[in-house]
Each structure stands twice: as structure tokens, then as C-alpha cells.
Amino acid sequence: MKSNNGKWLATLVLAFFAGLTQAIAQAPAVVAPPAAVNAAPAPAAVVAPTAAVNVASEPANPAAQPAVLAAPVLLPGSTAKPGWNVPQPWDKVQSVPQYASVPGHEANVLEQDQGQWWRTMRNGPVTFYGGIILLVMPTILLIFFAIKGPFRLHDKPTGRLIERFNSAERMVHWTLAFSFIALALTGLTILFGKHVLMPVIGASSFAFLTTIGKNVHNFVGPLFTFSLVVFFILYVKDNIFQSRDLVWLAKLGGLMSGHHVPSGRFNAGEKIWFWLSIVMLGIAVSTSGVIMLFPNWNATRELMTDANLVHAILSTLFIAASLGHIYIGTIGTEGALQGMKTGSVDETWAREHHALWLEEVQSGRRAGAAMGAAQPAAGDD
Amino acid sequence: MARMKFICDAERCIECNGCSTACKNEHEVPWGVNRRRLVTVNDGKPGERSISVACMHCSDAPCMAVCPVDCFYKTDEGVVLHDKDLCIGCGYCFYACPFGAPQFPQAGAFGLRGKMDKCTFCAGGPEDNNTAEEFKKYGRNRLAEGKLPICAEMCSTKALLAGDGEVIKSIYQQRVQRRGKGEEVWGWAMAYERGDKKMSATAQVKS
């Protein structure tokens, strides 16, 4: 294309063909002159003068010719506007659904940009800050445990047991708990595994483990959601906020003074855990999970990436909060695990932690929760 | 070393679907998966153009970045490939890809998708070249035979160009100079500019 002679010739030839194409595209309009109707090679016959006009109108000096051809001159009477066949810029059309002959969901979208945003968020802040939260939370709990130790009972156990959780309540709690742990471990593997576990055990072992993990996650997820609903039904009655919860909150449950503030069956802290985590995070994490769980429902990629972000962020918070719950329910509070394990707590424990609930049970105002027979307290105390 | 890329010339593509058909036949692509597909913008209206889309083998590939098990790898020629033995079928590459390239043979309840399948630039997978095992999982390895991708090789209007990015870009530039339109190469900004600004055909042709 550097040679000027060649350029002139090429321009001439191309102008002819450009005009020819234009004429063929406009054939019905072109045919209008009666003389052309009978001519067998109608388009060519009509086009020849067009091309000549096109070329003749250009400057005589070939060196001044631009390398890029000008748009062909339209025929007289043409209704076409200049540039009618110029495509829109790609960024205007490529993310809008168009026509695709190949079947497939969203096959008619040329490009989507949402995925890139999702990638930036997931690989960036969600992984980074999520990782920090999940490291900071157990650190705080360990420091707290090292300094203050567990909440111990002040008085000796009486040996009289009081039923705190019936078998249905315990069963749904542990279903929820173990499904949560399974989901947390497998979910964390999907987000953090390639940074933490894969360098240690190698790519193929890690992929094998994650394949199992992904399927565990996908099949245990619905079980978690189901037990969440049953849990809500069984536990909501005693988790409704009452005015005395404000007193408990104001004194932080006696964390500073060391004296428990009297509370009902569940104290304000437990109620906050119930409503904020079990109910709100539970619903959000379940909903976003279900969106990703059924690719056969043909959700858009945009919806699935949004669901993934919601799922990852809230699950991280859920896991961090659950660490607090697990701490308080096991090593953090003497006698708390026994209640959920065996269903019964000692009278002393009940008086020190849930005095108002004990009053209700002892006065017979609470149906279903019977006093246990006097017997030695189970376990090590 | 060549850096393999695709160009689809929208001024030439006639939406014959030959590329996607040839691809399916060459690789015996799983049922329901189309490694290459045709999209027609402004269908039936002035300014109608068609584009043949497949994996663009991005410089900074989003699929690679989000894969939880790192099953993707990039060859010396810039081709993005994946290992189906490692793939867990989570669908994240499909979320992330701008071009809709990663697809799954299944879309079942409980996230059962099967192993991801996508365009390999006719370069197979991690198995030994042109073994039966490689063919079964990824299709034919034409690059190992010294051939270019079948879709571009058989394109009847030569709209689809595959090969070294510099070579196909210069072909495209010549076409643009001759015809005076269509200077914007579809997909290159998304696929190559984010990772490597120098490789932009758009910027080169427009300047």
C-alpha cells in the first residue's frame, strides 16, 4: 500500500465495486428509469456511470487521495441516509440481548461486564477482609478466654435437674449446627482453599477434596434451610424481645460486674443471635444459596454473581458470629453445653443464668418444662 | 513465540454457522455445548452485523482468576486451557467470563453441572498430544499437528481469523484501510487490553 501508482489503481477498482454493491443493495430504486428495465445486466449498466462520477469528482492529483475510501455517492432519488449501514459501536450493542441462532441461555449476549466486577469483588475485598474477620474473631475469643476464663457457677450444683430443651428442640439445634459446620468448612474451602490448603496438599488432592466438598455443600444446604425453618418455629416464642431485655443489654448481661442480670428462658444476647444470625443471615444466605443451587432455573449470570457475593459476605459474618456462639455455649460458660447435650440443666445454673425462667418453671407457669427428679448432676461437677 | 488470538471481522461474517458446526464436528463437543456461537446484532435492520464468539483466550483471563481449584493454565502461545480432572463444576468461570465461553454439559438441580467445556483454540488439554484420552475430554489438538483452529480454517468468507495476534491484526488493518470501515475489532478491548495495553488492535488502527 506504500506505492502511489498501486493506490490509484486500487482506489479506482474499489470505487467501482463499492458503487456496484451500493447499486445492488438499492436495486428496486435503481430500476426506475425505463431504459434500464430491459437491459439484461441492469445493475452493472446503471452502476458504471455512478462509479465514473464518483471517480471524476475526486481531485486529479493521485497523491492527494486518501488511503481510506470515502463513502460512495448515493444515486439521485435514493432515500438512504449517509451511513445507514454503519454498525453501532460495539459497546452500545454487545451487552444487549441480540439474535443468536445457536440455542442457549444468554447465548444472544455478546459480552457481559458483570462477571469482571464480581471477580474484582470476590478475589479482592471479599477474600481479603473476609479472611481478616475469620482470623480476628477466634483471636479475640482466645484472648478473652486466656484473660477471663470461662463463666463459672458461683454456687455448688444442687443436683436437681430442670429440663431446658426437649428432644425435638435439641434435634433441630444439632441438625442446624452440624449442617452449618459442614457448610462452613466446605464453603471456606471454595473461597480460601486455593490460598491455604492447595499449596499444602497439592492441586489434584485439593481438587478431589473440593469436588466432595462442593457436593456436600450443595446437598447439605437444603437440609440447613429446612432445619432453619423448624428451628424458627420451635424457638421463636421465647425469643420475642421484652422490655427487661433492655436492662440486660444496658448492663451487657453483667459481663463487667460479674453478676448475671436476671433473664427469661433466653437472654437478650441469645435473642440478638437468634434474630440477627439465625433468622436474618439464615434467610439471606439460604436465598442466595438457592439461586446458585439450581442452574436449571436459568438465572442470569448477573443474578448468580450478585447472589454469590451476598452469600460469601454474609456467610463470612455468619461464621464469625457462630464462633462467638460456639465459644459461649461450650468452653466459655460452665454447664451451658450440658443443657443442649442432655436437655437438662442444674437448678443452680438455671438460677444464675436464667432466673426468671427458673421462677416460671418452678411456679408451674411454663407448660411442658417439668422439674427433673433429684439425682446427682451428670458429668464432672 | 506466537501469541494466539481470534478476530471476527463483522464486515465479512455472513452468519452461516459454519464455524460452530465445524467445531462441534471436529471435537465431538458434548451435547448442548457450543464452543462457538453466532450473535447477530441489529438483526434485520440497517447496520446488521454478525459475530462468531468463542473463548478469546484473554490476557488476564477472569476464568483463571476465579477458579477455586486453579484448573486453568495458559500455554506458551497464550492459549487458555483447563484440566477437566481438576474441574469441580462450580460454574464460577461461567459467571466471570465476558464472552460466555465456559459451558457445562448439565444444568441439574443441586448445582450438578458436570465438567466445564470450552474452546481450546484446537489445542487440546493437559494430556499427551493427540491421545485418545485427550480427544475424549477436549477434542482434537490441531496446534500440535501444526494446524490452526478449524473454525477459522474453514470460514468461507475468511471473516474469522485465528493465529498469531500480530499477523491477524495486520491482515485486519489492511482490510480496514481498503474498505474504510469496521475499524473497531470486536472483543479485543475486553480480552486483551485489560491485561496488555500494547496489543490493542483498536488503538492501533484508529491512530
Image (tube, coloured by chain):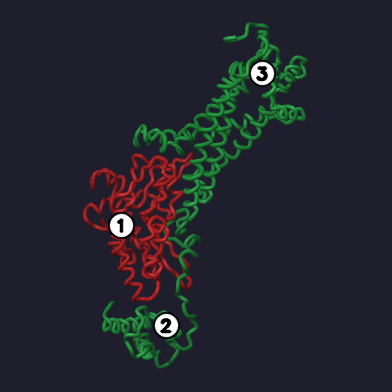
Chain colours: A green, B red
The amino acid sitting under disc 3 is Arg
List x then y, in percent, for residue B109. 48, 41
Q: Which mark is residue B4?
A: 1
Q: Nearer the viewer, mark 1 or mark 2?
A: 1
- Quarter in which the C terminus of chain A is drawn: top right
Q: Chain of mark 2?
A: A
The amino acid sitting under disc 2 is Ala
Q: CA distance from mark 1 to mark 2?
A: 42 Å
Q: Chain of mark 3?
A: A
Q: What kind of element bears circle 1?
A: strand
List x then y, in percent, for residue B10. 39, 67
Query: Foreground residue, A224 or A148?
Result: A148
- Whether B2 is drawn above or below B111: the answer is below
Residue A38, visible in the rendered structure? no
Q: Residue furthest left?
A: B145
- Circle 2 sits on which residue? A27
- Circle 3 sits on which residue? A164
Q: Which mark is residue A341?
A: none
- Whether B47 is drawn above or below A56: the answer is above
Residue A281, visible in the rendered structure? yes
Q: What kind of element bears circle 3?
A: loop
List x then y, in percent, for residue A114. 50, 53
Q: What kind of element bears circle 2?
A: helix
**Residues marked 3 and 2, same chain:** yes
List x then y, in percent, for residue A131. 49, 37
Q: CA distance from mark 3 to mark 1?
A: 68 Å
**Residues marked 3 and 1, same chain:** no
The amino acid sitting under disc 1 is Met
Q: Chain of mark 1?
A: B
**Residues marked 1 and 2, same chain:** no
Q: Nearer the viewer, mark 3 or mark 1?
A: 1
